[in-house]
Image (spheres, grey):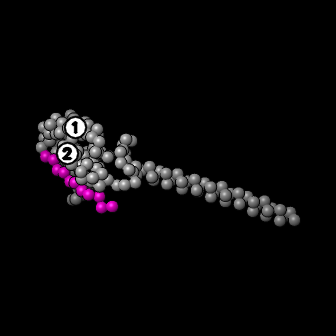
Amino acid sequence: MQQDNRFSVFNSSVKSVSKNTINSVVKSAALAMGLLIAATLPANADAKSDISAAPAVIHSVFFWLKNPDSVDDRKSLIEGLNSLRDIPQIQALHVGVPASTVSRDVIDSSYQVSELMFFNSVKDQDEYQSHPIHKKFVKDYAHLWQKVVVYDSLNTL
């Protein structure tokens, strides 16, 4: 009898641990899913697009400065690019500089500043081009660059 009682206590402990373990795993899985969803949201808090739909147009721009070693020129251009965030057609904007990744034949890090914009449509991208804030940006900052390369692509999803 005493042995059966020990098994009974053991079995109830195992069931309790199993339930606790299952609850813990479920909670961890829910947290992981939440983090995964959060990681896919646009970086800017005031994103205007439906997060379930990927932007249709991606606008990638690379700038080569007239004075590539000028920290002030680079900082000024970055400030100017960030001013474009006020254009309502832009769903998300990333402004960056070349990463210090391992050098490979396929990597071109000769530019000084880049921007990556997301638009919901070609129409929105066209409206951005003629928006007064964009025109002011070009007028005020074009003197800083010697070369600009643009890649516009459509989302294939």
Q: Which residue is mark 2?
A: 129
Residue at figure coordinates x 21%, y 35% from the top left = 76
x, y (%) of residue 144? Answer: 15, 38
**As displayed, is residue 134 above or below residue 149?**
above
The quadrant holding residue 26 is bottom right
Give the magenta range: 147-157
**Residue that extends furthest to the right in the rendered view of this protein:** 1
User: Eyeballing the image, is 86 above or below 156?
Assistant: above
Q: Position of residue 152 (x, y in %)?
A: 22, 54
Which amino acid lies under the numbered mark 1 shown in the image of this protein?
Answer: Ile
Q: Please name the amino acid that badge 2 sits on.
A: Gln
Q: Residue at x 30, y 51 (%)?
A: 120
User: Which numbered marker is on residue 133?
Assistant: 1
Dominant SS in magenta: strand
Closer to the camera in the image, 88 or 148: 88
Circle 1 crowding by C-alpha within 10 Å: few under 14, some 14–19, many from 20? some
User: Helix or strand or loop: what does disc 1 sit on?
Assistant: helix
Residue 70 versus residue 123 in the image, above or below: above
Q: Is residue 74 visible?
A: no
In contact (CB < 8 Å): disc 1 and disc 2: no
Q: CA distance from mark 1 to mark 2?
A: 9 Å
In the rendered image, residue 110, in percent from the top left (x then y), is placed at 19, 49
The kind of secondary structure element at disc 2 is: helix
| The one of 36 and 112 positioned closer to us in this rendering | 36
Q: Residues within 10 Å of mark 2 (few under 14, many from 20)?
A: few
Residue drawn at (79%, 64%) of the image: 7
Asked whether the viewer can see residue 55, the reply is yes
